């Protein structure tokens, strides 16, 4: 059952002006539409910030300079694994970043690569079982099975991880846009009329979760999918997403602009290259489910 999303974000940027700062932005066409990027560009211009849409098919030098680049290049990273043109676009971007070390990335590419690796992201979620135990936050047990492992060693590993037989894998086809959003209405999330309506997750627990993941990931723009246990109200983290959709989040534009300002202020104060993930604020979104 979908519950109202709990949001953790930075303070409002109302009244804050970031004069002479230039933000480069690369998002896929779909992401631009969902985020309403044109409206965000107008919002930033009203606060004295120029946001420039980056064209990866053209040399980046003439499009700059940029104080910070807001992006979701994870889409290109995935495509580059099997598409030479996407790999070339990614190489060109990385060459520009290497030649302009003072340009901040929101978020850093190595951090995105960690989340794209399901084994690494699984290990990060598994660490929550100990680091956030006091908050009753956990992740499902999982097991990495390496090629060449014999059946006996796999069975022993399954027992050590607390997994029980039979292990069942079933493929279910559904449109995630109709299931995971706050306003979703799907038979996959419908509630039995006799089911007890669970309370929303604790804001303090969600804040602790976001803070821990920010430290583990080195990222600021990420989303977390959690399942709420109806009986214990415990939270189980089932997925972490790069630069998720922020549809329905109040004052998202002002929160994002405020975060960009905070990152650049810290970068300027440090006087050396930093990343967006090092900021004390996070524009995060948690989608509770039960």
Image (spheres, rainbow, N blue to C red):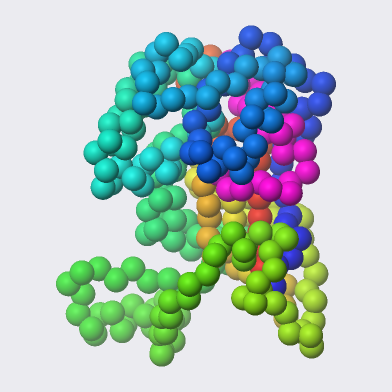
Q: Residue visible at 51% across and 16% down? A: 66
Q: Residue visible at 40% across and 27% down? A: 56
Q: Quadrant of residue 257?
A: top right
136 above or below 210? below
Residue 273, x across and y down, in percent: 47, 21
Total numbered labels: 0
Question: Magenta stretch?
Answer: 243-268
286 above or below 22? below
Q: Please give left or right for residue 99 compared with residue 36 in the image.
A: left
Q: Residue visible at 79% across and 88% down? A: 194
* Observer-nearest of 99 and 148: 99
Q: Can the viewer see residue 189? A: yes
Q: Please give left or right for residue 93 compared with residue 108 in the image.
A: left
As drawn, which residue projects farthest toward the left?
148
> Does the magenta-highlighted stretch encompass residue 262?
yes
Residue 123, x across and y down, in percent: 43, 59
* Observer-nearest of 188 and 33: 33
Residue 53, x across and y down, in percent: 53, 24
Q: Can the viewer see residue 290? A: no
* Observer-nearest of 152 and 199: 199
Q: Quadrant of residue 90?
A: top left
Q: Residue visible at 33% across and 68% down? A: 144
Q: Where does the C terminus fall, quadrant-wise?
A: bottom right
> Does the magenta-highlighted stretch encompass residue 141?
no
Q: Please give left or right for residue 250 compared with residue 85 in the image.
A: right
Please tell me whether the stretch drawn in magenta is mainly helix, strand or loop.
helix
């Amino acid at each position: 059952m979908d519950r109202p999303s709990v949001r953790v974000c930075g303070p409002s940027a109302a009244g804050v002006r970031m004069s002479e700062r230039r933000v480069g932005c690369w998002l896929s066409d779909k992401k631009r539409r969902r985020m309403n990027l044109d409206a965000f560009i107008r919002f930033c211009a009203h606060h004295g910030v120029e946001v420039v849409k980056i064209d990866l098919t053209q040399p980046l030098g003439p499009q700059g300079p940029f104080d910070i680049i807001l992006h979701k290049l994870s889409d290109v990273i995935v495509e580059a694994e099997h598409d030479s043109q996407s790999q070339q676009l990614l190489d060109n971007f990385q060459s520009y970043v290497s030649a302009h070390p003072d340009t901040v990335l929101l978020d850093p590419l190595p951090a995105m690569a960690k989340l794209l690796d399901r084994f690494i992201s699984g290990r990060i979620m598994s660490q929550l079982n100990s680091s956030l135990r006091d908050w009753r936050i956990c992740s499902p047990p999982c097991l990495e099975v390496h090629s060449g492992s014999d059946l006996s060693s796999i069975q022993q590993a399954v027992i050590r991880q607390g997994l029980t037989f039979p292990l069942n894998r079933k493929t279910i086809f559904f449109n995630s846009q109709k299931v995971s959003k706050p306003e979703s209405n799907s038979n996959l999330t419908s509630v039995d009329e006799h089911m007890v309506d669970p309370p929303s997750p604790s804001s303090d627990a969600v804040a602790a979760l976001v803070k821990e993941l920010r430290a583990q990931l080195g990222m600021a723009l990420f989303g977390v999918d959690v399942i709420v246990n109806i009986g214990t109200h415990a939270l189980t983290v089932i997925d972490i997403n790069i630069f998720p959709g922020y549809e329905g989040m109040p004052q998202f534009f002002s929160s994002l602009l405020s975060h960009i300002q905070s990152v650049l202020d810290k970068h300027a104060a440090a006087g050396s290259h930093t990343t967006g993930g090092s900021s004390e604020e996070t524009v995060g979104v948690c989608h509770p489910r039960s």
